[in-house]
Amino acid sequence: MQIQAFVIKKQPHGEYDQLITCYTEELGKITAVAKSSLKQNSIQGMHLDYFNRVEFDLVSGRGVPIITGAQVVESFHRLKDSLPKLSAGYFFLEAFDRIVFEYERDDELWQFLSKLFEKLNNQEIKLSDFRQYQKALLQVMGYAPAVLTLQQQNLRSHSELDAMFEQTAQRQFSSLKLLYNVLL
């Protein structure tokens, strides 16, 4: 099965393998094994990098699907060259990893992630832009009434919007510290 996906998390698995969590257009969020991707000469490992939109084949494995033949479709290199853009991007990768459920396809979430990476790649980012992207993600995920309430209150501090994400994930976001050190 040929799949397009954004890589959102990588974890070592065994000596040379990685567990790759990605958001796919066809299946939603999935976790699959990339065999031998940690070997020095692994071409597939280079393609399976954060923020990359990749295309790969997914085959059945023992309990966990296996990624084969990964190829970069788009690498968003300007996003990766800017610390402010990168720190904002890491927040959204962390949000997708912690809040989005596996195997729940959502075309709006796919479109959100695609457009977000394009915007981060092509435009400079300010804190106000980051706030708008946070609100947009919450609205796409169905938290619109809470977002409207926050907009009516004019967000007295950034911590109120961040608290919504952390409360939803039931844990703190480590990427927020980096983001505020860079953007403020």
Image (cartoon, rainbow, N blue to C red):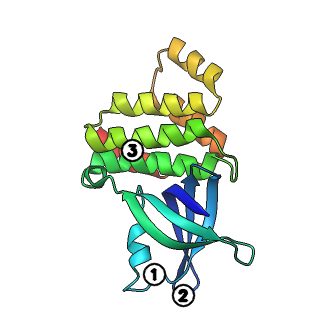
For mark 3, give the secondary structure: helix
Q: Is residue 71 depicted above or below 43 in this figure?
A: above
| Disc 3 + disc 1, Cβ < 8 Å | no
x and y, in percent, of residue 111 in the image: 50, 38
x and y, in percent, of residue 24 in the image: 57, 53
For mark 2, give the secondary structure: loop
Residue at x 30%, y 40% (from the top left corner): 183
Residue beneath label 1, please?
A: 38
Marks 3 and 1, how far apart at CA: 25 Å
Outermost residue on the right side: it is 63
Quarter of the image with the N terminus is: bottom right
Q: Nearer the viewer, residue 60 or 104?
A: 60
Residue at x 43%, y 27% (from the top left corner): 132
Residue beneath label 2, please?
A: 15
Residue at x 43%, y 75% (from the top left corner): 45
Marks 2 and 1, how far apart at CA: 8 Å
Residue at x 42%, y 66% (from the top left corner): 71
Q: How many numbered marks, from 0 up?
A: 3
For mark 1, give the secondary structure: loop
